[in-house]
């Protein structure tokens, strides 16, 4: 078998299927509608389709083991035997144990879920302790390699690398187990070599963040050991999402045969590479095509960067900057997009073609490359929005002092101690999704659609009253997604029909495209919120998505600074907040779950980001009176690094995911002297299990020990969109009862 790497490759490919076939099959399995064999048949078909697609595109080097039923980090944990004892003792099948780790069961809460570097993908956090018994389990990687080989496709198995795996893990000192883990990887690599695998890809994105000498030495030790194996595949270490910095020379000091560098998010990698000395016998895999956004590549500019790499290394291969997991599958089905926009886009399938073209260009020259695109159309500009931004003053991002606001809000709202609420959405039933689909297709007229949605809003309001919640929501039945919903009502956005991307597990999102200046055409949420408020005397929250999250969960234009686009979105939200307030809405929640997600990986870049991110939120929320209560919500990230920025948002109440982490974030808030309202989540809504009343009481008592009850709110971790009504209602009953018990009612 040839040991040449090839001229072109990708680091991974979408695994959900062009029509979300994996989502549908997995959820059918969870619901008992299909068995494990039927699920695997669907999965095998999706894998085969990907390999054939990549082979037919004439890609030289094709990855495998990038398919996952839920999460590739969880797959790696299973491959090295890092299965916590609470799951191992359940006595379930291998597949059901896997899903129990992801989703939890009554006897075993799920692994923590958090964001994958600067993306909207979520991974499951491995748990590593001194008692973890690592065991090499290469079965999945071997099975998929054999499947592809039977189709006539030679592949390169992919795993999360050992150093990044430990950096992502939770435990007292995961790196204390480095040597044990590396020996487990050695067993996997040996098994792969014996099966005829020529190359293996080990992903080490953890090293594009700031890393100390001990962590960099761990990287060097790991690959020195793996490189010294007598029987192993050739090793390709892939890095992505930024610049490697001091980790690059450490990696080049090991025997690995190929190193992948992101030259889109990490253009400084070129300078580092030039100063690294001779690269004889080494393949550099140049990430020239953006795997994290959907804009067409400037192929002539990219080939120039590739040529620079070719002057430094014996062999260069062209690749995507990261896995194509983060972009939709195929642009060709998007026949309704504006032609000017369509011409500027590339989804996963089109990015593979770009990679192949660039590989050819490095070998044969650039004559076959297309010309650069013309300038952005003038119709995408909004001069009035630009004028408003130019006229902004510091006072536009400031509210009154918090103690005065809090007193005014309490006089207006009259809430009890430990007020209860939810985060926004209620279960999205099949009937709701069907009604939205019928309305989009024209089979349900506007009046019929509004009638169905209003019936659901009334149901949600009555249910919350009956449960005894203090601050209500309208349930968001009209919303397909918390970002897409707003994108469809703002100028400067475009929506795709089939542009689905995996967020976590079976959860897929369809990010809108921000291609021009953002402007609000009309109020977006006022009618729904005021209708809900008309049904009850209790306060109903107006629900908005914040500017940072709208950017983070969209595909954003790259021809102006992110800060400018964020402020354009913030102005639209500012107008919406004022309209909600004028319509009598007393509480407005502006969600920013992506605040931490978008934080640059290098500390040197973080302050500039946080300045504009906090500024955009405050611009959106500072146009209302002091007695209007502003909430925000953050979830599923490690928030310690941005805790001061959370304080700087100046929201009156911040609800935050905390159940899987056992309220760890409260210590961070206490450390900075946080003095406003906070609602640490007491119920993990990403698991189907219903928490008992005692569990919620225990969580609340931990919270009260860290935060005075006068500032504490009681709420779930996140919105209830993905849950069913039976489990949501039972869990909320326990939540309300637990609050009453701790309150002493």
Image (cartoon, rainbow, N blue to C red):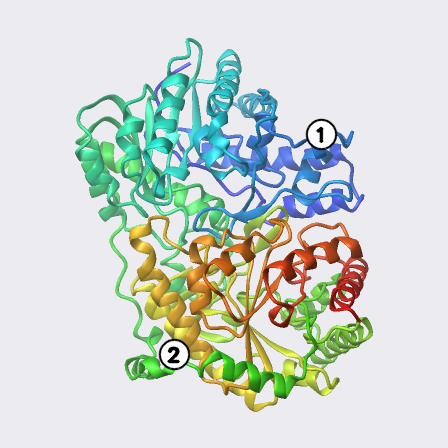
Q: CA distance from mark 2 to mark 1?
A: 52 Å
Q: Nearer the viewer, residue 534 or 260?
A: 534
User: Which residue corresponds to the image point at 55% horizontal and 31% vertical from the top-left?
Assistant: 76
State the residue position of label 2. Answer: 397
For residue 569, which quarter of the picture?
bottom left
Element assignment for label 2: helix
User: Which residue corresponds to the image point at 49% horizontal and 69% vertical from the top-left?
Assistant: 546
The x and y percentages for residue 664 are 56, 52
Circle count: 2
Point out the image quarter for the N terminus. top left
Q: Which mark is residue 88?
A: 1
Q: Are marks 2 and 1 in contact (CB under 8 Å)?
A: no
User: In this view of the protein, can residue 500 be seen by the observer?
Assistant: no
- Compared to 193, does 144 lie above or below? below
User: Which residue corresponds to the image point at 74% horizontal and 50% vertical from the top-left?
Assistant: 688
Point out the image quarter for the C terminus. bottom right
- Compared to 478, does 353 lie above or below? above
The x and y percentages for residue 195 are 53, 14
Q: Nearer the viewer, residue 228 or 172?
A: 172
The x and y percentages for residue 233 are 43, 17
Ranked by sequence position, the earlier of labels 2 and 1 is 1
Please tell me how crowded label 2 is: few (under 14), some (14-19), or many (20+) other residues with Cα within 10 Å.
some
């Amino acid at each position: 078998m040839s040991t040449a790497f090839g001229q072109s490759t990708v680091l991974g490919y979408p695994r959900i299927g062009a029509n979300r076939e994996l989502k549908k099959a997995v959820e059918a399995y969870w619901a008992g509608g299909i068995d494990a064999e039927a699920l695997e048949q669907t999965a095998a078909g999706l894998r085969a389709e990907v390999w054939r697609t990549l082979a037919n595109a004439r890609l030289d080097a094709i990855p495998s083991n990038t398919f996952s039923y839920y999460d590739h980090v969880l797959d790696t944990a299973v491959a090295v035997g890092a299965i916590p004892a609470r799951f191992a003792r359940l006595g379930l099948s291998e597949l059901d144990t896997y899903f129990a780790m992801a989703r939890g069961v009554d006897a075993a809460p799920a692994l923590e879920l958090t964001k994958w570097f600067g993306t909207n993908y979520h991974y499951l956090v491995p748990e590593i302790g001194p008692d973890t018994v690592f065991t090499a389990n290469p079965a999945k990687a071997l099975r998929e390699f054999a499947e592809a080989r039977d189709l006539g496709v030679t592949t390169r198995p992919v795993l999360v690398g050992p150093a990044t795996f430990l950096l992502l893990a939770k435990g007292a000192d995961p790196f204390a187990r480095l040597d044990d883990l590396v020996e487990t990887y050695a067993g996997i690599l040996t098994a792969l070599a014996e099966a005829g695998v020529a190359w293996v890809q080990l992903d080490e994105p953890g090293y594009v963040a700031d890393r100390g000498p001990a962590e960099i030495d761990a990287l060097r030790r790991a690959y020195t050991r793996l490189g010294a194996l007598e029987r192993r595949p050739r090793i390709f270490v892939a890095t992505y999402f930024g610049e490697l910095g001091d980790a690059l020379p450490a990696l080049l000091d090991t025997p690995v045969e190929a190193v992948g560098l992101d030259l889109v998010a990490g253009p400084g990698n070129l300078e580092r590479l030039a100063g690294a000395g001779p690269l004889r016998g080494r393949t550099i895999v140049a990430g020239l095509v953006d795997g994290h956004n959907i804009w067409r590549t400037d192929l002539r500019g990219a080939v120039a960067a590739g040529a620079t790499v070719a002057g430094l290394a014996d062999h260069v291969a062209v690749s995507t900057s990261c896995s194509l997991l983060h972009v939709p599958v195929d642009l060709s089905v998007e026949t309704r997009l504006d032609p000017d926009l369509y011409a500027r886009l590339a989804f996963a399938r089109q990015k593979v073609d770009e990679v192949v073209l660039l590989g050819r260009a490095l070998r044969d020259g650039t004559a076959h490359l297309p010309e650069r695109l013309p300038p952005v159309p003038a119709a995408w500009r909004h001069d009035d929005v630009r004028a408003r931004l130019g006229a902004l003053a510091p006072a536009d991002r400031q509210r009154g002092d918090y103690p005065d606001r809090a007193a005014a809000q309490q006089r207006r709202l009259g809430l009890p101690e430990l007020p209860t609420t939810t985060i926004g959405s209620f279960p999205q039933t099949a009937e709701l999704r069907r009604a939205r689909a019928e309305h989009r297709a024209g089979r349900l007229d506007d009046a019929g659609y509004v009638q169905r949605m209003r019936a659901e809003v009334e149901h949600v309001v009555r249910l919350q009253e009956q449960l005894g919640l203090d601050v209500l929501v309208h349930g968001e039945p009209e919303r397909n997604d918390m970002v897409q919903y707003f994108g469809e009502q703002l100028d400067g956005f475009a929506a795709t029909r089939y542009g689905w991307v995996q967020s976590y597990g079976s959860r897929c999102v369809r990010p809108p495209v921000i291609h021009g200046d953002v402007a609000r055409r009309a109020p977006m949420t006022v009618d729904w919120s005021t209708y809900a408020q008309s049904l009850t005397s209790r306060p109903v929250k107006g629900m908005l998505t914040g500017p940072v999250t709208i950017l983070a969960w969209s595909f954003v234009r790259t021809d102006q600074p992110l800060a400018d686009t964020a402020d354009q979105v913030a102005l639209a939200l500012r107008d919406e907040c004022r309209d909600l307030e004028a319509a009598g809405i007393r509480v407005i929640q502006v969600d920013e779950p992506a605040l931490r997600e978008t934080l640059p990986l290098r500390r040197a870049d973080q302050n500039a980001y946080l300045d504009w991110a906090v500024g955009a939120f405050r611009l959106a929320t500072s146009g209302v009176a002091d007695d209007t209560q502003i909430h925000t919500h953050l979830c599923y990230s490690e928030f310690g690094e941005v805790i001061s920025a959370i304080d700087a948002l100046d929201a009156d109440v911040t609800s935050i995911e905390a159940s899987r982490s056992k309220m760890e974030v409260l210590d961070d808030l206490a450390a900075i002297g946080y003095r406003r309202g906070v609602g640490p989540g007491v119920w993990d809504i990403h698991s189907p299990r219903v928490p008992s009343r005692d569990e919620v009481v225990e969580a609340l008592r931990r919270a009260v020990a860290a935060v005075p009850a006068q500032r504490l709110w009681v709420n779930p971790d996140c919105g209830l969109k993905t849950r069913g009504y039976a489990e949501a209602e039972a869990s909320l009953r326990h939540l309300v009862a637990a609050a009453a018990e701790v309150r002493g009612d």
